[in-house]
Every structure is written in structure tokens, then in C-alpha cells.
Image: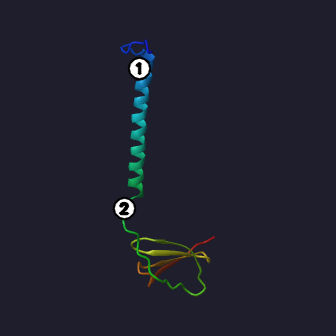
Amino acid sequence: MNDAPDDLPEPANLRFLRRLVTLLTAVMIGGVLLIVALLVMRLAPTEAAPILPDRITLPDGATATGFTVTDRMIAIVTEDSRILIYDPTGQTLRQTIQIEN
């Protein structure tokens, strides 16, 4: 048989511990929700990707090593230290820039 009365006051340190655990649980739930919200905002598509042409014809002897695309131009870096600037369609070579080593 249980002889302990049910209406004993809760010890102060136990009450503090219970409140602390409840507070930490709420903070952790809030932190997880914040991280999920930040991931959704960061990974959501913000604008359309640039449209790339199917094919770009490089000058004779040029081999591309890198490129960048903006809404106004396509820039291609070649192995022979040149930057070729094309129009956004990739059809017209606008400018050639020689890079000095």
C-alpha cells in the first residue's frame, strides 16, 4: 500500500528543473522551425536561370576552359589566355580580350 499523501508540495529545485526542461524544449522547437524556414527561403528558386545557346562556334584553335553567362553577354575564357565576349544568343563575337601573363 502507498502511505504517501498525494498533496505534498513540489520541491523548489524539482519545480525549477521542470520549468527549465519545458523552456529548453520550446527553444529547441523554435530553433528547428527557424532552420527549416531559412532552408526553404535559401533553396527556393528566386529567378529563372539564364538561357544558354545550343552551340557556340569558337575561333579556330580556341579551346574553352571556362565561361560565364549574364543577361547581356556570354564570356568564354580560352586556353590561349583570351576572353571571348559573345552576344546573349552566342552567335556574334563582340569582343576579344587578350590576357597578359
Q: CA distance from mark 2 to mark 1?
A: 48 Å
Placement of 13 over or under 65, stated as above or below: above
Pick the residue in front: 98 or 18. 18
Query: Please, which residue is most extreme toward the bottom here?
Result: 60
Identified at 41% across, 78% down, the residue is: 88
Identified at 44% across, 29% down, the residue is: 21
Q: Write down the quadrant of residue 64 in the picture.
A: bottom right
Q: Quadrant of the C terminus?
A: bottom right
- Give neighbour class at mark 1: few <14, some 14-19, many 20+ (Cα, 10 Å): few
Q: Position of residue 65 (x, y in %)?
A: 58, 74
> Which colouring convention does the figure follow?
rainbow
How many numbered callouts? 2
Q: Which residue is mark 1?
A: 15
In the rendered structure, the answer to whether residue 79 lies left or right of residue 18 reads right
Q: Helix or strand or loop: what does disc 1 sit on?
A: helix
Kindly report which numbered mark, 2 or 1, lies closer to the viewer in this rendering: 1
Q: Are marks 2 and 1 in contact (CB under 8 Å)?
A: no
Residue type at mark 2: give it. Answer: Thr
Q: Quadrant of the N terminus?
A: top left
Q: Which residue is mark 2?
A: 46
Residue type at mark 1: give it. Answer: Arg
Q: Helix or strand or loop: what does disc 2 sit on?
A: loop
Q: Position of residue 9 (x, y in %)?
A: 38, 13
Q: Write down the quadrant of residue 7 in the picture.
A: top left
Identified at 36% across, 61% down, the residue is: 46
Q: Write down the quadrant of residue 6 in the picture.
A: top left
Pick the residue in front: 89 or 47. 47
Q: Position of residue 15 (x, y in %)?
A: 41, 20
